Amino acid sequence: RLTPNVGDIVRYYDLDGGNVQGQELVGKITFLTRTTSTNSFLAEITQLEDLGEGYFAEYSSTKRMSKKTDRDIRQVSPLRASFVRSEQAYKVPIEPNGRVRVRQPTYDIEGWEGPQKAAINTNVVEADGLVYAQLKFKLLKNAAIAGLLGTVIVNIVKGTEDSIIYLAGAMASIGYLFFLSVKTDTLASPDRKLGNNVANLRFLMPVVVIVAVALYNQSLGDANPLKDATNPFDRVTAEQFGSAVLGFLTYRIPLFLGQLQEALGGDTTAVLPGSAGVALQLAQTSIVEPAEVTLKDALVPVLLISGPQATGRD
């Protein structure tokens, strides 16, 4: 039984004017959802670029969004496709007449209830949510503490005016973290689009500080240190700009100190970026003494073949 899955390579048609059936296209299923109106399933398909000789490749990320379309699952035909790494494309069998060879005209959806959903452990989700909330509060709290300490130091070293600008930059960094958390909080919710739009306000935080300083200088009148400036970008002094930027970057200090503390505590993988830290951690946990490794006399060879259903795996 051949049922649809995300990642399948399929054939579908797109109307191109005079052809009643439409233009034959090849694409990849990227999403499946049930439709209540037709009691069927709707497939989001991303068109693949025809390279010739049966090779079909994904478009660049800039074009991929414009190549998405929706089709009733009963209007698409599954193909037997294999990914060729040397070509960075999918190889699809071609008929002598130049059309793609389908595995069967349609999927077997009679009695099919849709893609299987993985079981979700609600206890784990609640525990992870609690850990995330604590981490978010910790980041905001540490950024606020670092900002206050930095303000005191700047006040002692440079004076009141620079310390106030530094404090404004530090408050902007807290706002940056807050709006970033809004994006994370709404990542998998129906309000994701709204969350993204609200989260984009974080990019305005440092701009607001610089504009506020420029307006402050403008309000000084003759005492404005840059009253003769004609360039709108020259409304703040280098010292004021540096105080604002340093204040905004204050939130990075507790992050760095946290990683350094973990490293000094024995976890050297904490300061290694990305996959390097993961690889070192796996290497450390997988090292065993040679004496502990024993070989069985009778070893049974096992051949495991895995891959997407589009490659012919049933």
Image (cartoon, rainbow, N blue to C red):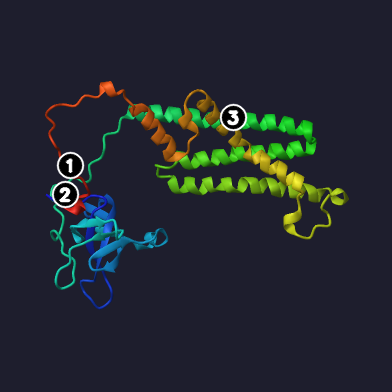
- Looking at the image, residue 77 sits to the left or right of residue 61; the answer is left
Residue 17 visible here: yes
**In which quarter of the view is residue 102 placed?**
bottom left
- Looking at the image, residue 211 sits to the left or right of residue 21; the answer is right
- Where residue 306 appears, as percent x and y from the top left, is 20, 45
> Which residue is the site of mark 2?
313
Determine contact: label 1, label 3, CB under 8 Å: no
Going by the numbered disc 1, the residue's amino acid type is Leu
Viewer-closest of 166 and 208: 166
- Where residue 294 appears, as percent x and y from the top left, is 21, 24
Callout 3 crowding tier (Cα within 10 Å): few <14, some 14–19, many ≥20: some
Viewer-closest of 125 and 259: 259
Front tag of 2 and 3: 2
Front tag of 1 and 2: 1
Front tag of 1 and 3: 1
Q: Residue at x 63, y 28 (%)?
A: 145
Q: Residue at x 27, y 21 (%)?
A: 291
Q: Earlier in the sequence, mark 1 or mark 2?
A: 1
**In which quarter of the view is residue 171 placed?**
top right
- Where residue 148 appears, as percent x and y from the top left, is 68, 30
For the residues labelled 1 and 2, the Cα–Cα distance comes to 12 Å
Question: What mark, if any, has residue 142 been given in the picture?
Answer: 3
For the residues labelled 2 and 3, the Cα–Cα distance comes to 52 Å
- Where residue 274 appears, as percent x and y from the top left, is 44, 39
- The furthest residue to the right: 222
Residue 133 visible here: no
Q: Secondary structure at mark 3?
A: helix
Going by the numbered disc 3, the residue's amino acid type is Asn
Question: What mark, if any, has residue 268 been given in the picture?
Answer: none
Question: What mark, if any, has residue 304 been given in the picture?
Answer: 1
**In which quarter of the view is residue 82 placed?**
bottom left
